[in-house]
Amino acid sequence: MALFNIENLSFTYPGQEKPVLDNISLDINRGEFMVLCGQSGCGKTTLLKTLKNQLRPKGELNGRITYCGKDVTALDERVSAAEIGFVLQNPENQIVTDRVWHELGFGLESLGADRNFIRRRVSETASFFGMEKLFRAETALLSGGQKQLLSLASVMVMSPKVLLLDEPTSQLDPIAAAEFIGTLNKINKEFGTAIVIAEHRLEELFPICDRAVVMEKGRIIADDTPRKVCQGLDKNHPMVCSMPSAVRIYALSGGEGGCPLTVKEGRSYLTENAKNSIRSLPPKKPDSNTETAVEMKDVWFRYSRKGADILRGVSLKINKGEIYTILGGNGSGKTTTLNVMAALLKAYSGTVRIFGKKITDFGGNSLYRQNISALPQNPSLVFLKDTVKEDFEDICAVCGYDQKESTQIIADTAEKLAITHLLPRHPFDLSGGEQQKCAIAKCLLTKPKILLMDEPTKGIDAFAKNSLSGIIRGLKARGVTVVIVSHDVEFAGEISDRCAMFFDGEIICEDGAAEFFSGNSYYTTAANRITRGFYDNAVTCSQAAELIRLNGEKND
């Protein structure tokens, strides 16, 4: 018997004409590891939330969902809470207590479990997840990766039969994300817990999952093993750019025969099918503009007088019209650096200059009037009105645009980001990816000379990332400086002029994107792992595919 049986499910949000789920039929089996993927707004999150009564959104639902043969709407609340676990995209929205051990015990206490049972279950769960040293820590002081792991552990302490996860790695650095996914694999293999995860990050998931379900406009367009899904998609389908790097390199280079799925298989594919007499592409021309847009010199910052230093002598120079990306682990100081750069936080030592002028010399709101615009890590913070359009009109009024200019710039920006259909929607009714795109649009409406972006690709699909890349390159062509903090190494490798590695509150190294990722072993792209030793300085799938085409196949 399937755990979940979904029959002819359709769902429409209040006030909307088009259903976000359109006649979905799907079985989720016991012990299965399933990945839900698709473009932002395709219905992944809504589908997950309809499976758990406590999270089911308001709206018109047609069709039937059963859990272990029983209609989910008739499920006992204790059964739903204990057996159907849910991990949200943002752990800040899930953690409810002040200490790690309180959080681990909260679910069982809510179910009225025996005290001795709770103590035993909490201690063994903490041991399984390697949280002994964090056991008495304050939840507010945990890093993003630690908070997400705690969210998972606090669900697993109740021994659920199925885990539903909504883009749980979107806020994690590459190493923390790989560890989190490895933990999910361990849970699935060792406990037989069924896992259904909605994700855009498929590089690590496809090699370990049993089944991949691809959604498009509220419908299921593919449902099979990951390899068969990759082979079955048309090479021009937008979802191909979301697939693992080995698949993309195979598709972009016109590969034939068996499709590689993993880095290991990708390396074998290269060795067996491609030549490498041409080992590298011509180097990228350095930018001629040397005017400094942003300069930080020996900047130190701490959040409280007696607290530890978060920034420890940060120094950097970013040129006008440059795309500069800062990478590093959770809690290393990246976001703090961006906030100091935007004057949202004040350093206690050191200087910050914007176009040669001390940041402290900008009076009133002059720093933010067509100088700097900042996209926060949590996109919901930028919205103040009841609809996206009202929010956009409000920021245009603040910028002093007349009615005609306001209407035109809103229409143009919405079209570029493919969010015109979202303008009448309430910002908080949008999916994570849709909300992110609208927040980016609001920043662009201010016509900034310097755009600071904290995790701009969080929650958006690969197709939207390509659109965002085009927009950022367009800004660069107009002389706009873009500073990005990101965990998305694939995006950084594609878009950046220079990259910097942050560790322990300071910049450890910085270099051009190709040299940066080719010099790293862990903070590098899957494409570079696939091609390393075979080609030189190839860090994107398109670069790898171009080298394959230039060299020709071995049997040519």
Image: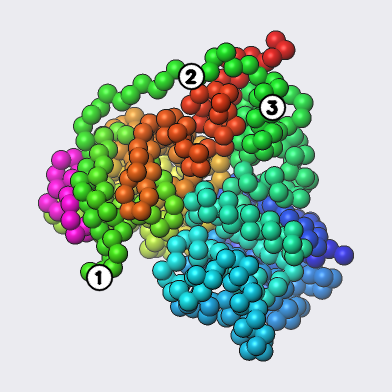
The magenta stretch spans residue 453: no
In this view, the residue in front, 169 or 143, is: 143
Q: Neighbour class for label 2 at 10 Å: few (<14), some, many (≥20)?
A: some
- Quadrant in the rendering for residue 206: top right
Are circles 2 and 1 on residues that touch, CB within 8 Å?
A: no
Q: What amino acid type should be assigned to the residue bearing mark 2? A: Leu
* Residue appearing at x 47%, y 61% in the figure: 144
* Residue appearing at x 81%, y 60% in the figure: 29
* Residue appearing at x 47%, y 48% in the figure: 487
In the rendered image, the residue lying farthest to the right is 1
Tell me where the magenta segment starts and ends, as one range.
346-361
Q: Tell me the tag on residue 269.
A: 3
Residue tagged by mark 1? Answer: 306
Between circles 2 and 1, the one closer to the viewer is 1
Asked if residue 54 lies left or right of residue 514, the reply is right
Asked if residue 247 lies left or right of residue 429, the reply is right
- Kind of element beneath mark 1: loop
Q: What amino acid type should be assigned to the residue bearing mark 1? A: Lys
* Residue appearing at x 50%, y 39% in the figure: 521
The x and y percentages for residue 252 are: 62, 26
